[in-house]
Image (spheres, rainbow, N blue to C red):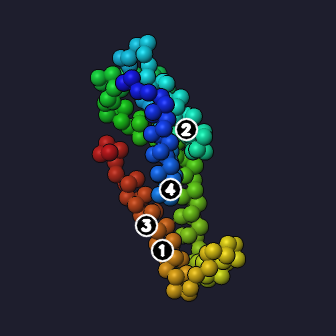
Amino acid sequence: NDWNPEAYRRDLTQVVRKVQAAGKIAMVARIPYRSDVGAQDFAERLSRVVDEVAEAQGLLPGPDLYTWFRTHPEPLTDHLHMDDQGSVELMRLWVDAAAPLRWLAGFYIWVMRGTPLLVQVPFVYFALPELSPWLRMSEFTAACVALALNVGAYNAEAIRSGLQAVPKGQL
């Protein structure tokens, strides 16, 4: 538990850069609180490092697991691992932290499902190169990209509705 904050900063920065280099959106949570550490609260020091790295890298803020578990230590069964209710709260905190991404995905799905495919194909072929010249592509590639974007939106909606159909007791 006595982690070196500087080594943690170096390692966390390296992981964030690798995630971003892979084209993904990095989101880092503050370290969960441990209820048995007393005066030597290593998680608090490491959570400050998480905040500094997130600010330096321009990341979306992740969930504040430290503060939540510090104010709600009941779900921590052995001072570190959480019970079922704590797991549900952990998932809720991640969902709340990803709300901006959820809005963006919802907008994408709304646009793609709200316009006909016959409008999307010419848009990808003619309009995208006008917005950015490096998006110029052949007719076949434009059709494939438009179809992939369209099908992706419909599949995302099918998966979302399937997950929402599962009763809460079965999660």
Where on the picture, by quarter, is residue 160?
A: bottom left
Q: Quadrant of residue 129?
A: bottom right
Q: Nearer the viewer, residue 119 or 40?
A: 40
Q: Which residue is mark 1?
A: 148
Q: Residues within 10 Å of mark 3 (few under 14, many from 20)?
A: few
Disc 1 crowd, CA 10 A, few/some/many (<14, 14-19, 20+): few
Asked if the residue at tag 3 contacts the one at tag 4, i.e. Cβ–Cβ closer than 8 Å, the answer is no
Mark 4 or mark 3, earlier in chain: 4
Q: Image quarter for residue 108? A: bottom right
Query: In the drawing, what numbered circle is on residue 53?
Result: 2
User: Residue 2, relative to residue 9: is it above or below?
Assistant: above
Residues packed near mark 4 inside 10 Å, few (<14), some (14 to 19) or many (20 plus): few
Q: In the image shown, does 38 or 93 lie closer to the viewer? A: 38
In this rendering, position of residue 59 left or right of residue 70: right
Specify the quadrant that holds the N terminus: top left
Residue drawn at x 38%, y 54% is 163
Locate residue 93, reporting x and y percent.
47, 38
Which corner quadrant holds the C terminus?
A: top left
- Say whether marks 3 and 1 touch (CB < 8 Å): no
Q: Position of residue 164 (x, y in %)?
A: 40, 53
Q: Which three-letter amino acid code belongs to the residue tagged 2?
A: Val
Amino acid type, mark 3: Asn
Apparent side of residue 78 relative to residue 47 in the rendered image (left or right): left
Mark 2, Cα crowd under 10 Å, few <14 / some 14-19 / many 20+, is some
Q: Amino acid at mark 4?
A: Ala
Q: Amino acid at mark 1?
A: Ala
Q: Which numbered disc covers residue 155?
A: 3
Residue mark closest to the camera, 3 vs 1: 1
Mark 3 and mark 2 lie on one chain; the one further toward the N terminus is 2
Q: Earlier in the sequence, mark 1 or mark 4?
A: 4
Task: Give the mark toward the camera: 3 or 2.
Answer: 2
Q: Earlier in the sequence, mark 4 or mark 2?
A: 4
